[in-house]
Amino acid sequence: MDNSFFFFIYNFAAGSIIRCNVINWVQQRGPPNERVRHKPWAKGKLKQHSEIVISSPKYYSGEWHDVFNREAPLHVEIGTGKGQFIVGMAKRYPDTNFIGIEMHESVIVSALEKCLDAKVRNVKLINADARGLTEYFAENEVDEIYLNFCDPWPKHRHEKRRLTYPSFLAQYEYILKRHGVINLKTDNQGFFEYSLESFSQYGLTLRNISLDLHASDMAGNVMTEYEEKFSAKGQRIYRCEAVWNG
């Protein structure tokens, strides 16, 4: 049986049709589920730098401008990994406040080290599960969200774990400001197309869609570690922005 199929997503707000071809999503892969190498010293180092790693984020809900000691746009990366993207963005956009969320201590400690090496002052890190977003941020507090190369969870029984599943979109809707933006990048075609459909059905406006980011004319792209690895192998990088209309 041919498991290739086509579907169309019509984005009424943008007035455009996106034609997508999904080919055996289960066989496609996203970021490899690499076993996280345990770093027993990570916990101690994270505690030593409480000026960057915020241990109790729920206490700052609605008051993140006080943590940064300034009023500025607030951008949040969910699954910040080793920090290459968020540090690169912080250096490029010094007038924006960035928060990176990563649940693994042995991973986020690498992001901390990058922050220290780069001496960026507009990045804070949260070592916690992203499912607590509505506890960490107040309603209408965040300007933009970044979802970079998150686990695609291709099996149907794991659909609710995908970061573009409606229950996660509901959290984003709560914390994002009016016209807030979700920025998505992935190497997984199936997950990308699922996300486009999920965004569209939720009522978001799709824009700046790229089916091959590195072959496009988009300027100012900051790459993640995974993005560098995948693009070096010649894999396509898919990208889009989903904008809240509320």
Image (spheres, rainbow, N blue to C red):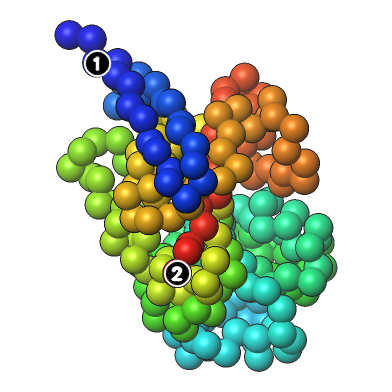
Front one among 75 and 136: 75
Q: Which x, y percent locates residue 168?
A: 35, 61
Would you place residue 126 above or below residue 38 in this image?
A: below
In this view, 51 is above or below 109: below
Tell me the number on the disc at residue 3. 1
x, y percent for residue 57: 49, 82
At x 55% / y 29%, what residue is drawn? 211
Task: Tell me which corner region of the image, top left, top right, bottom left or bottom right, holds residue 48.
Answer: bottom right
Q: Is residue 87 left or right of residue 227?
A: right
Please state the total of marks drawn on the protein image: 2
Q: Earlier in the sequence, mark 1 or mark 2?
A: 1
Q: Which residue: 71% across, 85% down? A: 71
**Residue type at numbered disc 1:** Asn
Q: Is residue 33 visible?
A: no
Is 68 in front, or is 74? 74
Q: Which residue matches tag 2?
A: 246
